[in-house]
Image (cartoon, helix red, strand yellow):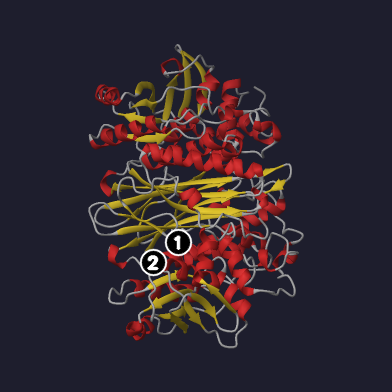
Amino acid sequence: MNYRDAGLSDGEYSKIKAILGREPNELETSLIGVMWSEHCSYKSTRRLLSRFPQTGRYLVQGPGENAGVVDCHAGWGLVFKVESHNHPSAVAPYQGAATGVGGIIRDILAMGARPAASMDGLFFGMPASGRSRALAEGIVGGIAGYGNAVGVPTIGGKTFYDPCFEGNPLVNAFNSGFVRLDKIVSSKTARAGDMAVLLGSKTGRDGIAGASFASRELDEGDRERRGHIQIGDPFEEKLLIECCLELLDKDLVVSMQDMGAAGILSSSCEIAHKSGAGIEIFCERIPLREDMEPWEIFLSESQERMLLVVSAGRFGEVEDMARHYGLECAIVGSVTDDGSYRVLKNGVTIADLPIGILGDAPVINWPAAPPRDLEERRELPPDMKSADPAADLLKLIGSVHGSCRTEIWTQYDCQVQLRTTAEPGEPVSAIRVPDSDSLVAFAMEAEPWKCYADPKAGAMETMAQSIRLLALCGADVLGMTNCLNFPSPENPEHYYELSLCVEGLAQVCRDMDCPVVSGNVSLYNETSKGGIYPTPLVVTAGFVPHYAYFASGGHAHSGDVVFLAGPISGSLGGSRWQTICDPSTPMTPKGTTWRYDAEMERAFVSRALSTAHKADIKKSARVVAGGGLAVALAKEAIFSGVGMTVDIKDRNPIEVMFSEGGPRAIYIIPSAAADKFQECWEGYPVMKLGEVGGESLTIKNFLDVPIRDLHSAFFGEPGATDAKG
């Protein structure tokens, strides 16, 4: 294999020869090429990712393992991570999405945790496009087909539509699970003399070189080259989960690693490298579905496989357990103390590399330059007006970004395992902590439009929004995981956007004491027609000490008082309203979003938590987010089934009602508890907006919309009232 065919540059190949003191053979070249791919090595982003804070009050295990772990009290750890499966889902939507779910579940399992909840971040082209509809149907079907069968609930997520995702949809799969803190498994504990054991499915040709495939832009030929796509079997995965958990319960496993990108190669070399050891792998011992060349075996990404490290003399017990579950099980190698990665076939060494050359790809610092049109992106369009505010609100509520997602959510089983307390459709998802009355809550957020208009401000708003959502529902922040979805870093403008987005996320995490526990980077998300918008997706986890404290919306009653906590307006920059306020407005909203203020964010979080934990204050609460205050009020009216009348006095109604961003929320409070509520928010802006009652949402001197019309728009055909759909 030519080194360029393996994805290596001239400079990289020269470095390899210098390290080895010789020319690598073809197998060695292919092994190094895959491990030095962007997908496996993070060579373009390792320097940037070092900016993320990795310490926190509840942090147990940060980046460096299969997933992060935080302390969720009473001896339990919460394990969580998000991964991308973008390129595979663009080529084979059903299997690409399905195996994304399966892979992230195994990452959680590899930490010794029982997978407990999944979420998905989905980014599609516009529904009016037949191609986008077909991709969306296949992707959602794959998530449902795998997740439902494997017995892990899908409890929420994020869906976003824009033409930039037409040919390159994004599928970001999140999973979380629970592990006893004294039972966490590490990939760093292998020792010389231990056995490397392959457990699960046989190895085949599906998914060969998938890591390299995910490290370049898509082209039209990829539609036909489906050999890069893995094939999943959720029923086999269910058996694998139960077998691994029982092996761990019986202390039969020293270390464990999921076989994800680069398959046997990455799992075996990562365990050896992290453990400061070496490893030998024997080709002829690996259970195969078909005859395969050594390079195919090592680069295969066949699903439902785990690599276990087992102490000498205990394989018989492991084999018995595997036989009980009907799984393949074989000793495929042994851990050594010489720091080498060796591949043998029938006693002959066919590859021999220092373990460090596989685990430490050289870092690339790409040049960065501001986009030439960045200042234009940051400027709000002039003379934005509304000819009919009521019609605007109905369009926002009924648009692809504002309407109900039942066509997606109803395909998912969200209640299997019986832990789910906040289902899909809620701003925050939540599940119960085992053996307790506590909850963990998750907020998934992404703002591609805002990050395109102003990368740092957009990323800061994305991160701050996820923390606001948790605080409002009564959850103290535990930590964050992220998936950084960007086009090619080789373009200086794209690398500039990536750098600023990371800087923005990191700053908010530092300010809000939110460690980054794990994550994923997905680059080269582009086609010949162009790249996606910068799309950093975050999932922030929080802890609710008792389920009775969990606050949500949709509980307003006639006679209640409507309050706004926070600034009266945010920013129209990057807002949804721009897409419907004028037919001539481009699809992509412009303008810088809300300017982040750390002191104000901390004040909002502390008071929101205090309010949520006041059991004697009945409340209905909703963060002001996409669509602005008007949409927040409309959704509250829809889900409560009652109208409300609001008076914003002589303020600019467009800015007040449709601006987005900032630490703001609406609260609906019984009149008898209004004084107690305001005491919770002492020292922070709070404004009484009006009262609940009637059959319409009325904003005095601005709009009046019957609840039945809002309800019809929200639950109607998705996209039917979207002016840009």
Q: Quadrant of residue 548?
A: bottom left
Residue at the image point whose x is 74% and y is 66% from the top: 375
Q: Which residue is mark 2?
A: 552
212 to the left or right of 428:
right
Residue at the image point whose x is 34% and y is 37% from the top: 189
Looking at this view, name the residue that lies furthest to the top.
346
Residue 199 position, x and y percent, is 36, 27
Q: Quadrant of residue 670?
A: bottom left
State whether residue 610 appears in this view.
Answer: yes
State whether residue 50 appears in this view.
Answer: no
Query: Spatial distance from mark 1 to mark 2, Cα to Cα?
Result: 8 Å
Residue at the image point whose x is 50% and y is 64% from the top: 711
Residue 456 position, x and y percent, is 61, 63
Q: Secondary structure at mark 1?
A: loop
Instruction: Check disc 2 and give the amino acid type.
Output: Ser
Instruction: Check disc 1 and give the amino acid type.
Output: Pro
Q: Quadrant of residue 316?
A: top left
Who is closer to the viewer here, 559 or 298?
Answer: 559
Who is closer to the viewer here, 393 or 380?
Answer: 393
Quadrant that contains the N terminus: top right
Q: Secondary structure at mark 2?
A: loop
Q: How many marks?
A: 2
437 to the left or right of 355:
left
Marks 1 and 2: CB-CB under 8 Å? yes
Q: Which residue is mark 1?
A: 427
